[in-house]
Structure formats: C-alpha cells, structure tokens
Image (spheres, rainbow, N blue to C red):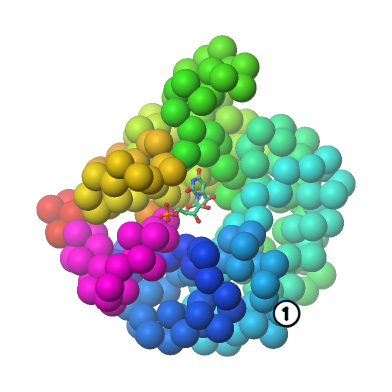
Amino acid sequence: MKKVNEHLIVALDGMNSKQALAIVDELGDAVQYYKVGMDLFYKMDNGELLAFVEKGKRLFIDLKLHDIPSMVQSSIKSLCQFQPEFLSVHASGGLKMLKAAVKGAEEWARENHTARPKIIAITVLTSLSEQDWADVGAENSIREAVLRMSLVCKEAGVDGVIASPQESSSIRALCGPDFIIATPGIRLMPDPNSDQARTATPVQALSGGTDYIVVGRPILHAASHGEVVKAILENISQFIQKG
Ligand SMILES: O=C(O)c1cc(=O)[nH]c(=O)n1[C@@H]1O[C@H](COP(=O)(O)O)[C@@H](O)[C@H]1O
C-alpha cells in the first residue's frame, strides 16, 4: 500500500531553479514527488535536473510531448537521462505516437539496464470547459473524449492518464485498477480567479479513484507551503482511513 505522501505530486511552477530546489529542501520528507513543467525545465541545467533524484525525490518531467512518433520516441529517450519516474505526452498525438513514447522509454531502459519511466498522457486539459472544447471543433463531450483517449492510451501500452476528477471514476471502471490516473486542478476552496475549469478538492479527486493529485499554486502561493502540504496530507490520510 502506498504511503500518504505518495498520492501527492507538487508542481514546481512559476519559479526559477534556485527557488524550486529551495522548496524541495523546505518541504523535506513531507513531499516525495515533484513535477517539473515547461517553464522550470527550460530554466534548469542538467545538474539541477539531476538534483531531484540525488535528493531522493521522485521526478515527473511534464513537457507534454506532442509531435510525430519518431520525434516523441527520441525525445523521451533524451529525457530519460534525468531519471524521471513519469514523463508526459498528449494523448491526442494518437496511437502511433503513444506507442512510440513507450518504445523510447523501453529502449532507454534496455540500453541502461534499468526500469523505464512511466508514460502518462494528458487527455483534455483541466483548464478547458465544455464551451472551450466545442470552440476548437470538438463534437463530443469532454467526458466522451477523455474516455476514448484513455482507451487508446491503454491500447498503446501507456501507463496512465491525466484527467479531471469529473472523468476519473469512469476511466477507472473502463481501464482497470492498474491504469494510473493523475488529477490536477485541485483546489482546497473555490477559486473564481483560477485558470482551471474542471476542479475538485483532494478528497473529491481521490473519491473518483485517482492515484495522484497534482497541486501547484494552492501550495506555492500560500503563506506557509508546509502548512498547506500538511493539510492536504491530512485530507488524504483521512480519506484512506475511511477506506
Ligand atoms: O499535465 C499536467 O500536469 C496538467 C494537465 C492538465 O490537464 N491540467 C493541469 O493543470 N496540469 C498541470 O497541473 C498543474 C496544476 O497547477 P495548479 O493549478 O497551480 O495547481 C500545472 O503544473 C499544470 O501544468
């Protein structure tokens, strides 16, 4: 069984590498998983990226790859040098691209005699509402699209998806217990100024069957990062105990 803090991924967004690594030190053992997204990745040098694993942390490099299959395959291989536990791609890249992502990770693992990072696919961004989705030409609902994408991901051998709490219980039912679901858009209280459209509290997300909640600004913008992490971990712990 996973430890309580193995359900939380802290997204280190909107800061430079020095600030990000200072937060890792500040939060200490409370947080195991950190997500480095595009804005931080482009600011970090190789040594700083390797520091996460050196500090005993588990790394999610979230560059949301979306390109032709051969490019995604080689890019995944390049990213493996930082020993991430998770790498992300967009599910809308399609079956061939998703298979190429897994192949890139497998090749790297074989060549380096180690386990491969897990490939996680973004379905429909949690910042999109049904209206935003329709505006870009989609004719099905977000839920239908997320479920279809999840099935394609499973067929491709992708390890799991990122989706909102509104879709996670259906994904769990469709794709089974071992398929990873990670859920961003977590808010501890309603936030009308958020750029997220499909949000939930930590407990709502976990009730939907998600494995990991991904939390950025609610922790990073708080007066005390540690206090918010503590509150989230208490929520998770209470949820697990209720079983
Ligand atoms: O890939 C992601 O992690 C992701 C997918 C998605 O659909 N929505 C989403 O918000 N995210 C990420 O989750 C984090 C959410 O940050 P906050 O809204 O600040 O908690 C950001 O790092 C986003 O890049």
* Image location of residue 59, percent across then percent down: 55, 70
To which quarter of the image does residue 237 belong?
A: bottom left
Above or below for 165 versus 134 = below
Residue 68 showing in the rendered view: yes
Magenta-colored span: 214-236
To which quarter of the image does residue 117 belong?
A: bottom right
The residue pinned by badge 1 equals 46
Any magenta on residue 226?
yes
Above or below for 194 versus 16 = above
Any magenta on residue 160?
no
Task: Please name the predominant secondary structure of the magenta segment in the image.
Answer: helix
Q: Residue at x 26, y 68 (%)?
A: 228
Q: Residue at x 66, y 33 (%)?
A: 92
Above or below for 171 versus 178 = above
In the displayed orientation, state which residue is furthest to the front: 193
In the displayed orientation, state which residue is furthest to the top: 139
SS state under label 1: helix
Is the CB–ligand 1 distance for label 1 below 8 Å? no
